[in-house]
Amino acid sequence: MINKMKIILMLCLSPAIALTEPVYSLRGKASLYNESKTPEIKRLQNDSGPVPRAYVQQPPLIPHSTKGYVVNKKFNKCLTCHSWANAAESGATKISLTHFSDREGRDLSNVSARRYFCNQCHVPQMDAKPLVENTFQPIDVLQAP
Amino acid sequence: MNEYQQNGKLSHYWRLFRSPSAQYSLGALLSIGFVAGIIFWGGFNTAMELSNTETFCISCHEMEENVYKEYQDTIHYNNRSGVRAVCSDCHVPKDWTHKLVRKIRATNELFHKVLGTIDTPEKFEAKRLQMAQHVWKTMKETDSRECRNCHDYQSMDYTEQKKRSVQQHIQGFDAGQTCIDCHKGIAHSLPSMVEIDPSAVFQ
């Protein structure tokens, strides 16, 4: 009985509790009459060597800017350095063998449609701090002993 | 007026044109010629300059709707230094003789404008490879002269460039390569590159 009373009391009070914490729009706490702070523009990281992976299946990150790079049906800027034909001369890492098979696992002579649009999996990095704390650790097979 | 009279009039003017002037002094005639020369020369060069402006280049919808739109997304339209390269910076030589030759060649482009050879995006796309190859060939022949009007590889500070740029530039210039060998598509969408680099195209 006491418990039932408690629940009813809480239900009655809950709107009041909710009201103490006002609801904010996506704009945040800035009032309509003040300008909100413009977020700082993030910059692309400078060229570097390959970035270590967090897990073995991870698509490697792009360690350089890709500003202005075009990838469409007629042309793929990334492959002008990373294709098997161009990798040796350009000194870029060549694309993995997994990129030459379709989803049924059949081997192809050139890059598969599902691997052609590089940016679906590979991304460059900005100089931004992570938005939330992250305690993820790479598995031990990826860590140097 | 019959034919005989007309001929008579013509030969009269011709005689007048050839015979030395009795009325005007040599000085006056030379001065008139000099001033007329300046006006003609100035007008000629002004016309050449006018046809070098961006406004002129994109007054054709063929250019405005295709290559101009694409160029607006590139480094030569907007960049941190605020220095813009306009159409003529890359497509028309700076020195007078080469410029004149390029302008005379451009009459062929006017001809195709009248024919409507590339007057729809589809037609433009169908001709793009041919047009691009034309530009590449010219740039290869001139060692990318128009690029070098602004970019001089001897003034490049390799300590300021990206790692990849440095490596490729040193290697490339040593091997006798020129800007356009590596920087195709610097200002516009590329045509299908299947003939140039099949390993970088979707097939």
Image (spheres, helix red, strand yellow):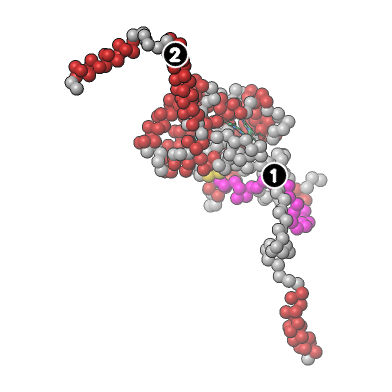
Mark 1 residue element: loop
Q: What residue type is labelled 1?
A: Leu
Q: Is residue B55 visible?
A: yes
Q: Position of residue A30 (x, y in %)?
A: 72, 62
Label 1 close to label 2 by CB (< 8 Å): no
Q: Position of residue B161 (x, y in %)?
A: 69, 33
Mark 2 residue element: helix
B199 vs B106, nearest the viewer:
B106
Query: Outermost residue, bottom direction?
Result: A1
On screen, residue B115 versus residue A109, left or right, reads left
A78 lies above or below A7: above
Q: What stretch is highlighted in magenta?
A: A115-139
Which mark identifies residue B28? 2
Q: Which chain carries label 2?
A: B
Q: Distance between the residues labelled 1 and 2?
A: 69 Å
**Does the stretch in magenta take in A127?**
yes
B1 lies above or below B24: below
Q: Mark 1 lies on which chain?
A: A
A57 vs B68, nearest the viewer:
B68
What's the magenta bit mostly, secondary-structure-wise?
A: loop
Q: Name the residue tied to disc 1.
A: A44
Give me the residue at 67% from left, 34% from top: B164
